[in-house]
Amino acid sequence: MTFTSRKVLAIGTVLALGVAASGCASHKFVRENIAVVDARVTEVDNRASAIEGRVTRVEGTANEALARANAAQKLAEGRFLYEVVLSDDSVKFNNANNSLSPEAQQRLSELAQRLKAENRNVYLEIQGHTDSSGSAAANERLGQERAEAVRRFLSTQGIPLNRMSTISYGEANPIAPNNTRAGRAQNRRVAIVVLS
């Protein structure tokens, strides 16, 4: 082999090693960059999953709110006509009691007669209320029992059950302060909302 051939061979070998070395460096560089990109993609995926979870919770809350609004709309489709409140001195409920007094029964009989005389298809929402004595759960239950007592009595007076619904507000909507005996007595009541 001649000197020139050896020189060309050496230069070719150096170039081949350089290309091979640069190829290895390129692969290493690419692998490092891919690892960085993969880490970023994973981070973005994690953020997207967290956002998706929040969106799902918001959609659930929105769906619950929509269901409540639809129920309220069905109830309020009719026009408000008037409200009868059983809370004057002769009709008040005793503490922790859901029994209707004779005076309350008389007022409810008069209401039933009025509704039948008007001969209109009305809807009654019967709302039970309590004072703040006792636990919130017990008051919720007592408010429901008071509303149901009124509903049962009106049913005996000829008002169709499918035209009445009951709801308990428990101690949530006082009309007087609960820190006095007179105020607590006013809060123990049933309100009948008449809708057309």
Image (spheres, rainbow, N blue to C red):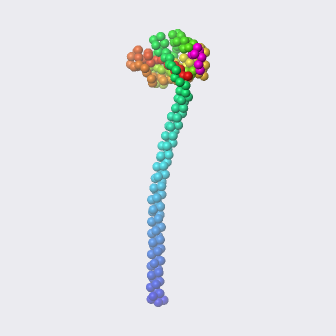
Residue placed furthest toward the bottom: 2
Residue displayed at 52% across by 14% down: 99
The quadrant where residue 109 appears: top right
Residue displayed at 41% across by 19% down: 176
Residue displayed at 57% across by 21% down: 122
Does the stretch in magenta take in 91?
Answer: no
**Where 61 falls versus 33 (above or below)?**
above
**Where 104 falls versus 136 (above or below)?**
above
Task: Classify the position of the C terminus by image quarter.
Answer: top right
Magenta residues span: 115-121
Residue 53 versus residue 108: which sits nearer the camera?
108
Residue 161 versus residue 33: which sits nearer the camera?
161
> How many numbered callouts?
0
The quadrant where residue 40 appears: bottom left
Q: Is residue 145 visible?
A: no
The x and y percentages for residue 100 are 52, 13
The quadrant where residue 172 appears: top left
Residue placed furthest toward the left: 179
Residue 159 versus residue 102: which sits nearer the camera?
159
Does the stretch in magenta take in 116?
Answer: yes
The x and y percentages for residue 19 are 46, 74
**Where 178 falls versus 66 (above or below)?**
above
Residue displayed at 47% across by 46% down: 51
Q: Is residue 182 visible?
A: yes
The x and y percentages for residue 90 are 47, 10
The x and y percentages for residue 41 are 48, 55
